[in-house]
């Protein structure tokens, strides 16, 4: 192998390095970055609002969770977007939100329905914040650049539509009569014995106005002649029960 051959090999290697450097130096313009942020933010906001307004709030009427869901989803999308641009691991981002969630929600018992919607909006925010929208073009030219991928945007939109459709199907199309629970401080402890269970249920139905499915006897206070009874009943169509098991006045603050 001659010196000329070696020089030619080094020149070819240098050209390859330059080519890779040219490709990796391709950056999105400020307009493209702002467009991407706007698309992600407003798409996520619209999907989150649809889920909360037409599915969650229609039944629960909890304005506190309404605010929490919308703000939580928007904040998470922005954090994922900014950390994605800063090349921070997604695992770290989700871990931070898990820590925040444990710190905040461990002090209050969150109903299973609210917790389900919380995870739904987190998942939607992650999809909308991390799905690729731009693709690198012009690799065979001297000016590689990013361009909006309409195919990726269509896939992202379809993913959100699938989530909305699934929630609608479960909330309406496949929904069965829902069971609810009411915690009752009962004063007739003479009826809590198993032999008088039918009489107990009849008295509860008369005094609560609901069709009782089953009862469960809890704490009994013989000094005050009272007992806690968990009453399970079936909700009517369009009805909801969000405070059935609450016993303190502070828990009723919406």
Image: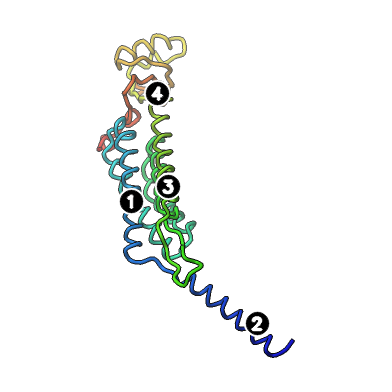
The quadrant of the rendering that contains the C terminus is top left
Nearest-to-viewer mark from 4 and 3: 3
Q: SS for tag 1?
A: helix
Disc 1/disc 2 C-alpha distance (Å): 53 Å
Q: Is residue 225 visible?
A: no
Badge 1: residue crowd in 10 Å (few <14, some 14–19, many ≥20): many
Counting residues from the start of the chain, the first of labels 1 and 2 encountered is 2
Badge 3: residue crowd in 10 Å (few <14, some 14–19, many ≥20): some
Query: Mark 1–mark 2 contact, CB under 8 Å?
Result: no
Q: Which mark is residue 74?
A: 1
Q: Position of residue 151 (x, y in %)?
A: 44, 50
Q: SS for tag 3?
A: helix
User: Which image quarter: residue 179?
Assistant: top left
Name the residue carrying label 2.
9
Badge 2: residue crowd in 10 Å (few <14, some 14–19, many ≥20): few
Q: SS for tag 4?
A: loop
Disc 4/disc 1 C-alpha distance (Å): 31 Å
Q: SS for tag 2?
A: helix
Name the residue carrying label 3.
156
Is residue 236 depicted above or below 30 in this figure? Answer: above
Badge 4: residue crowd in 10 Å (few <14, some 14–19, many ≥20): some
Q: Position of residue 117 (x, y in %)?
A: 39, 39
Nearest-to-viewer mark from 2 and 3: 2
Disc 2/disc 3 C-alpha distance (Å): 45 Å
The quadrant of the rendering that contains the N terminus is bottom right
Disc 1/disc 3 C-alpha distance (Å): 17 Å
Name the residue carrying label 4.
178
Q: Nearer the viewer, residue 254 or 119?
A: 119
């Amino acid at each position: 192998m001659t010196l000329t051959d070696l020089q030619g090999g080094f020149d070819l290697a240098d050209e390859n390095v330059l080519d890779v450097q040219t490709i990796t130096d391709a950056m999105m313009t400020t307009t493209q970055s702002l467009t991407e942020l706007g698309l992600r933010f407003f798409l996520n906001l619209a999907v989150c609002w649809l889920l909360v307004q037409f599915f969650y709030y229609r039944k629960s009427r909890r304005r506190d969770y309404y605010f929490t869901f919308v703000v939580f989803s928007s904040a998470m999308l922005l954090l994922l977007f900014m950390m994605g641009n800063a090349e921070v691991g997604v695992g770290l981002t989700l871990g931070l939100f898990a820590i925040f969630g444990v710190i905040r929600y461990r002090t209050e018992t969150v109903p299973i329905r609210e917790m389900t919607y919380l995870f739904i909006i987190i998942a939607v925010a992650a999809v909308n914040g991390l799905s690729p929208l731009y693709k690198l073009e012009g690799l065979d030219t001297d000016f590689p650049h990013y361009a909006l991928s309409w195919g990726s945007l269509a896939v992202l939109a379809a993913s959100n539509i699938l989530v909305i459709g699934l929630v609608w199907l479960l909330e309406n199309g496949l929904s069965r009569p829902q069971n609810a629970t009411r915690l009752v401080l009962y004063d007739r402890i003479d009826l809590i014995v198993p032999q008088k269970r039918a009489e107990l249920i009849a008295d509860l139905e008369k005094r609560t106005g609901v069709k009782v499915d089953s009862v469960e006897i809890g704490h009994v206070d013989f000094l005050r002649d009272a007992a806690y009874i968990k009453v399970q009943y079936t909700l009517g169509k369009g009805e909801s029960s969000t405070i059935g098991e609450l016993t303190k006045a502070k828990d009723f603050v919406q």
